[in-house]
Amino acid sequence: MSKDIEPDWDPASPAAQVNQIAVYDAVRSRCPVAYSRQLHWSLLGHAEVSQALEDHATFSNAVSAFPAVPNGMDPPEHTPFRRLIEPYFGTAAIAAFEPLCRRIAGDVAARLPAGEVELMAAVAEPFALEAQCAFMGWPETLHEPLRDWIRQNAEANRTRHPQATAGVAHLFASFVRAQLDARRAAGDAAPDDPTTRLLRDRVDGRPLTESELVSIVRNWTVGELGTIAASVGIVARFLAENPAVQDALRADPAALVPAIDEILRIDAPLIANRRVTTCPVEIVGRGIAAGERVTLIWAAANRDAAVFGDPDAFDPERNQARNLLYGAGIHVCPGAPLARLELRLIVAALLARTRAIRPSDRLAVRAAFPSGGFRTLPLVIELAAAG
């Protein structure tokens, strides 16, 4: 049994609370398949994580007792749900959302003052919240309740207290159900947005159940709010510390998407995902029994020196094909086109608004597992000349 295995590391160590990435690098270099009391089995090497992503029969996504549609499903159950949601992030849907998202990004950047700012509160979190509500067709009156919910959810994730976790899940479900009920009441007059379309959509010829609807929207929204905000902070910090890259991207916005992907390979916004083994498996000489919890550490795999050389070297062209930022296999992130659009537009707006983004003398505070990026991120803003 895994409980009898001597731990290889401690994911909750004081060092990991200060800088997760450095700890994952150190563990991966000596133990790409590592055991801990908190996470059980962790895969940290690029090859090991890729193996789990491609072998979905052995490494199951059905890890929770609660509905998780479709990311917590395996084939064949997963297949029709995946087919249903992909068009919501297809080329036509993303193109239709782009003008509104561009306006939101411009408005958020326009509010940015000169001088020192706390970028997470001033830009990253407001943009993620406003863009996601707009994409879902939710009213601005939800901005503040959701902003407060984000704080509660982060605290629940930090403490892992079951009552707190259940409470924030119930609160978010109430937001979703209110939006669904409003569209049901409106009937044919309901707005044509993703929330309404989900109500009218069918899987295997039937409507989605209430729990399936809530699960899909939770997966889209909760994941998007956290990872987009973290990504904006990570990119802004990287540009502040690498002025040559900042100036190059300001001059050539067409290079933003591969550059952003590479920055987020270097410093992950999403730290890990879970799997559970369906049968015994051996990886790098470590035997893992059936029914074991497995954690895929993206933040380690995407910095594997065996694949990327110097993990901190910024080289979008060289590294793009092996970048696991959005996963791989049948569970590759369906929302990647939306995330790339949002990040491209908000970073472009920030660069257009500024002449320079520089580090602050005040220290940033990194987020702790399971979150990536920064809790607070002071940066110094020099605004571009008007006109």
Image: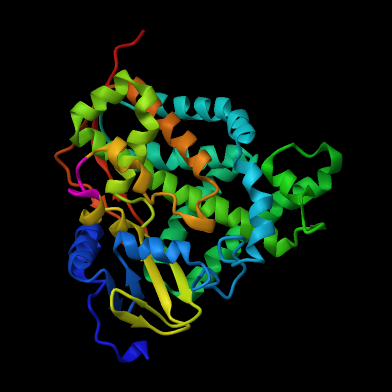
Residue sitting at the far top: 387
Identified at 29% across, 16% down, the residue is 384
- Residue found 19% across the figure and 49% down from its top: 309
Residue ID at (62%, 47%): 86
* Along the viewing direction, whichever of 58 and 65 lies nearer the viewer: 58
From the viewer's perspective, is residue 193 above or below residue 65? above
Horizontal side of residue 197 vs 349, given as left or right? right
Q: Is residue 91 left or right of residue 354?
A: right
**Up-down: is 142 above or below 1?**
above
Q: Nearer the viewer, residue 327 or 309?
A: 309
- Is residue 37 positioned above or below 326 on the image? below
Residue displayed at 34% across by 11% down: 386
| Most common SS among magenta residues | loop
Q: Is residue 312 magenta?
A: yes
Q: What span is colored magenta in the figure?
A: 308-313
Inspect the magenta stretch and tell me whether residue 304 lies in it: no
The spot of residue 59 in percent (x, y) is 47, 71
- Using the rendered view, name the quadrant where residue 151 is placed: bottom left
Identify the image quadrant of the N terminus.
Answer: bottom left
Q: Position of residue 50 (x, y in %)?
A: 39, 60
Q: Position of residue 265 (x, y in %)?
A: 31, 47
Q: Quadrant of residue 73?
A: bottom right
Colour setup of the view:
rainbow
Q: Nearer the viewer, residue 367 or 115?
A: 367
From the image, which quarter does the C terminus lie in? top left
Residue 175 appears in the figure: no
Question: Residue 379, how many percent across, how many down?
Answer: 24, 36
- Can residue 264 be seen in this snapshot? yes
Nearest the viewer among 380 and 73 is: 73
Is residue 24 left or right of 149 when viewed as pictured? left
